[in-house]
Image (cartoon, helix red, strand yellow):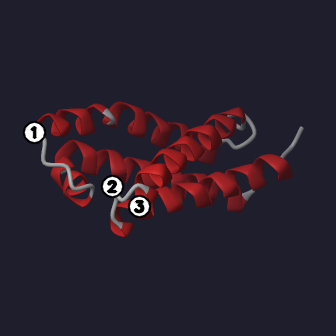
Amino acid sequence: MIYDRILFAAAAVWNLVAATMLLWRPEVMLQRMRIADPAAVWLARSFVSSVATWGIAYGMIAFDPHRFRDFAWLGVISKLLYFLINTVAFHQGRLSREAYLPALIDLLLAILFCEYLWRSGR
């Protein structure tokens, strides 16, 4: 139970830090992705609502893993989609290894979420 709380608290922090970066320093992410379009800053900032909401959801799971367990399924889907989209871009040469790293971390979190779901099955 403590492991589950730590896992989802760490996922919450990961998402909330990413949301903070997207809000206050989107150019850092865009630079890593080799994107120079000024409109991309607005698009990056628009992702804050989704990334921050997921951070809050993971925090809710950390607070009460049993009550909010079903959010983890959605987290698996979200993190796998993010990983897949970034994997395609990486293999097409549109992402550097540095920019691809967060997708690998999200893949690891998706795997750990699946392990949690399997272990805590009802």
Q: Nearer the viewer, mark 3 or mark 2?
A: 2
Residue 13 location, quadrant? bottom left
Residue hosting label 2: 94
Tell me the crowding category of disc 3: few under 14, some 14 to 19, or many 20 or more residues within 10 angstroms, Cα based. some
> Could you say where residue 62 lies in the image, as x and y percent from the top left?
61, 48
Whether residue 43 appears in this view of the structure is yes
Distance between the Cα atoms at labels 1 and 3? 22 Å
Quadrant of res 73:
top right
Q: Which residue is mark 3?
A: 100
Q: Is residue 90 above or below residue 48?
A: below
Q: Position of residue 64 (x, y in %)?
A: 67, 41
Residue at the spot 43% in from the left edge and 48% down from the top edge = 15
User: Which residue is depicted at the point 87% across and 43% down?
Assistant: 121
Q: Residue at x 28, y 31 (%)?
A: 46
Label 2 close to label 1 by CB (< 8 Å): no
Secondary structure, mark 3, is helix
